[in-house]
Amino acid sequence: MFALAALLVVLGVVAVFASQNAHFVAMRFLGWQFSWPLAGIVLVTLVAGALAAFLVSLFRQVRLGLRIHDTSGRLRKAEKELETAKVDLDKTRADLALARRELEEARRPRAPGPSASPAPEAGGASPGPNLSRGGGPSGSGPRRG
C-alpha cells in the first residue's frame, strides 16, 4: 500500500514538472538536431540514467551470483575434505591408543612363573651349561661331596 502511495506522489510531481516545462528546446547530439519539450528531454535522460544504473547493478548481481556459486562449490569440497580428515584423525587416534597400550604392555614387568621360563630347545638339551655337578660345561670336573 505504501509503494502505491509513493508511486502516486512521484507521478504527481512528474505531472507538475511536465506542465511547467512544456516549452520546446533545440537539442544537438552527435550530429543530430531536434526540438523537444524540456520535460520530455529531462524524463528521457532520467530513464536512460535509470536504465544504465540497472544494467550496471544487474552486471554486478550476476558477477556476485557467480562468485557465490563458486564459493559454495569450494565450501562443499572443503567440507568433504574436512570429513575425510576427521575420519583419518579418528583412525590415527585409534592406532595411537593401540600403540600406547602395546607399549605399556611391553614396559610392564612380568612376574616369574611357569610361563616365564624358557622352553627347552629341540633335542632335550638344557638351555645353558649344567653347573650342578660342580664342573664346567661338560660336567667333567672334580666332584665335591
Image (cartoon, helix red, strand yellow):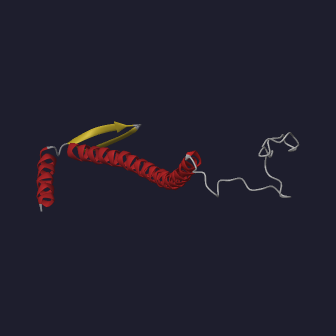
**Of residues 52 and 19, the one drawn nearer to the viewer in this rendering:** 52
- Residue lying at 20% horizontally and 45% vertically, measured from the top left: 39
* Residue in the picture at 42% in, 51% down: 68
Q: Which residue is at a point 51% across and 56% down the rendered structure image?
A: 87
**What x and y, as percent, mark residue 72?**
44, 53
- In this image, 116 relative to 26: left or right? right
Residue 90: percent from left, percent from top: 50, 54
Left/right of residue 15 with respect to residue 66 in the rendered view: left
Q: Is residue 107 above or below residue 86?
A: above
Above or below, comparing residue 91 to residue 135 in the picture: below
Left or right for 57, reference 131: left
Residue 4: x and y, percent?
A: 14, 60
Residue at the outermost front position: 145
Q: Quadrant of the N terminus?
A: bottom left
The residue positioned 33% from the left and 49% from the top of the image is 54
Residue 69: image x %, image y %? Answer: 45, 53
